[in-house]
Image: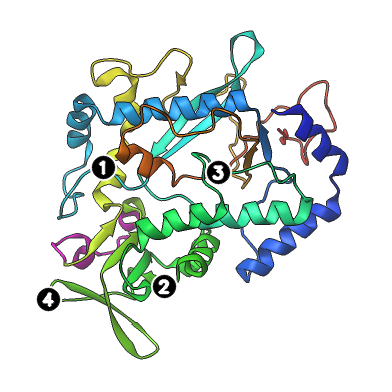
Amino acid sequence: MNPLYRDSFNRAFSEARYQALLDFLTAEAGFEIPFRICETPIFLTERLSRRLIDAAQEIVEALRTPEYQRYAERAIPPGSRVPGPEGHTAFLQIDFALAVGEGGEVVPQLIELQGFPSLYGFQYLLDRGYRHAYDLPVELVSYFTGLDTEGYVRALRELIVADEEPENVVLLEIEPEEQKTRVDFVVTEKLLGIPTVCAVHGVRERGGKLFYSRNGREIPIHRIYNRVIFDEIERKGIDLSPIFGRELDVTWVGAPALVLEDQQILAALSGRCGRPPLRASLQLRLGAHRDPRGPRELRAEAALLLRRPGSRDRRHARAPAGARAAGKLHPATPGRVRTGHRHPRRPGQGRGADDVRL
């Protein structure tokens, strides 16, 4: 991590400032966020930022190979393909762990990929929250590929809303008011002006068209920002075939079938497509991680990656246009790993017996 910003942040940190962060997020959301917020951003060096960007670009290039396309076509389970045109996903998240590699250098290790939206609205809010509470240096940014806050929101609007009226674009989810990610829906509504609609109770199909009601009006749906996960449909035994099981006069922003397709990426990238597509510097890990010393828990927390842009902070020279368009939409991935073992020389770190701070 960047020692300059890390040391400065640690010296200025106080519980009062952390509470100010929580209060700001609660006020903006309109309710208390149901998952834990990390006390601190993660400060990246330019070198580590570049390694993350290069590793992500290698993966994007691998996804565009004929070998991967052939594998992915077979990966979609029977009955899970949604009618309609297919292609590359509009959204791609690449989640890395930051691990100690050979020689003690921090290196990225691939955890998972998903061709499905992440918490784009919440990441925008979290960036504002950290800056509000901690008065962070203005030169630190949380966006990649040259985006700033305004450009990030504009890119989201261009992809999700496009040329439609916001009321004809919906964020679709199952019982959105019950989801832990509800804060992301609220922020997205504020940023883009689109409504969040329940896929179970809020959508009607008629003649191959979809509608929802608001203030006594029936409003046609032209574009769907899909946040419905097929696993939840199956787990809850919900019949959404009127939406997902037939050809509709609607544009999917992120085709539902591709959620399942791109969740099979890890197996494809590990060499089953005929060749290992990544350099040895990027280590792949498949499946669940087991600690030989016993079971441990991976707890999700919301954090923010911050870095100071360097001279090489620009789009990857080899990135094709489609990859650039998709890549610029992904903010820094949140999360923090807390293992079940405390550092023997740092007994005071963290907030609990199994909490290790970055």
Mark 1 → mark 2, Cα distance in angstroms:
26 Å
Mark 3, mark 1: which one is toward the viewer? 3
Dot placed on the residue nearer the N-terminal end, 2 or 4: 2
Mark 4, mark 1: which one is toward the viewer? 1
Span colored in magenta? 233-248
Dot placed on the residue nearer the N-terminal end, 3 or 2: 3
What secondary structure is marked by label 1? Answer: loop
Residue 88's disc is 1
Locate residue 308, reporting x and y percent: 65, 35
Q: Amino acid at mark 4?
A: Gly
Q: How many marks?
A: 4
Q: Which residue is mark 4?
A: 207
Q: Amino acid at mark 3?
A: Tyr
Q: Is residue 320 above or below residue 302?
A: above
Mark 2 → mark 4, Cα distance in angstroms:
23 Å
Q: Is residue 339 above or below residue 18?
A: above
Dot placed on the residue nearer the N-terminal end, 4 or 1: 1
Locate residue 173, reporting x and y percent: 38, 63
Residue 143's disc is 3
